[in-house]
Image: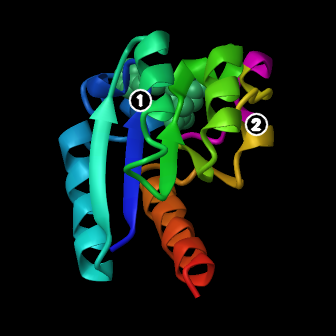
Amino acid sequence: MSKILVIHGPNLNLLGSREPEIYGKETLDGVNEQIKTLASNEGISIEIKQSNHEGEIVDMIGNARDDFDLILINPAAYTHTSVAIRDAISAVGIPAIEVHLSNIYSREEFRHTSLIAPVCHGQVSGFGVHSYILGLQAAIEMLKYSSK
Ligand code: CA2
């Protein structure tokens, strides 16, 4: 059974409580339920983690090699700043897919650059909670083809 690690970056624990006009009204628990439902329908094993700390996220990525086939990550604000997370993804040896709730290219200019995207297989941005679902569907397709 394929195993996917989902990582939510800083402040995503606040989802649903503030800025609903940008990030929607769904809570992180609600997002996670949707992710788990799709994974279970597709026969995929999922582990979901959230951290507000860059080093912790670097460790999660580094430790994923032996236990997971793919990482689905919303690096949140670290998208635009973290060489450490980029290097961890680049080094881990399993594919990663980057997701964003908002369309980072239609927001402030500092959000237009992702340091993470160049080391990911692909990026989904701008579909709210559905970005995670689309990213997960893409991940599942990728894993199907890579195991043939
Ligand atoms: O659109 C996304 O998913 C982002 O990764 C969200 C980050 C932001 O820094 C990125 O540029 C784009 C922010 C996550 C914080 O989420 C909050 C949710 C509710 C209330 C406050 C913050």
Considering every residue shown, the one lying at the far front of the view is: 66
Image quadrant in which the N terminus is located: bottom left
Residue 127: percent from the left, percent from the top? 54, 54
Question: Left of 49 or right of it: where is 57?
Answer: right
**Residue placed most toward the observer, 101 or 33:** 33
Relative height, residue 21 to residue 95 (above, below): above
Q: How many numbered discs?
A: 2
**Residue placed most toward the observer, 85 or 65:** 65
Q: Residue at x 78, y 28 (%)?
A: 112
Report which quarter residue 53 is drawn in. Answer: top left
Q: Is residue 60 visible?
A: yes
Residue 5: percent from the left, percent from the top? 39, 48
Image quadrant in which the C terminus is located: bottom right
**Residue placed most toward the observer, 115 or 132:** 115
Is disc 2 placed on a helix, strand or loop? helix
Q: CA distance from mark 1 to mark 2?
A: 27 Å
Q: Residue at x 40, y 56 (%)?
A: 4
Local crowd size for mark 2, using a 10 Å CA cut-off: few (<14), some (14–19), many (≥20):
some
Residue 106 belongs to magenta span: yes
Report which quarter residue 33 is drawn in. Answer: bottom left
Q: In the image, which residues are magenta?
A: 101-110
Residue 143: percent from the left, percent from the top? 54, 73
Q: Residue at x 49, y 13 (%)?
A: 54
| Scheme of image coloration | rainbow
- Residue type at mark 1? Met
- Mark 1 = which residue? 60
Q: Is residue 101 visible?
A: no
Residue 10: percent from the left, percent from the top? 42, 19
- Mark 2 = which residue? 105
Relative height, residue 36 to residue 109 (above, below): below
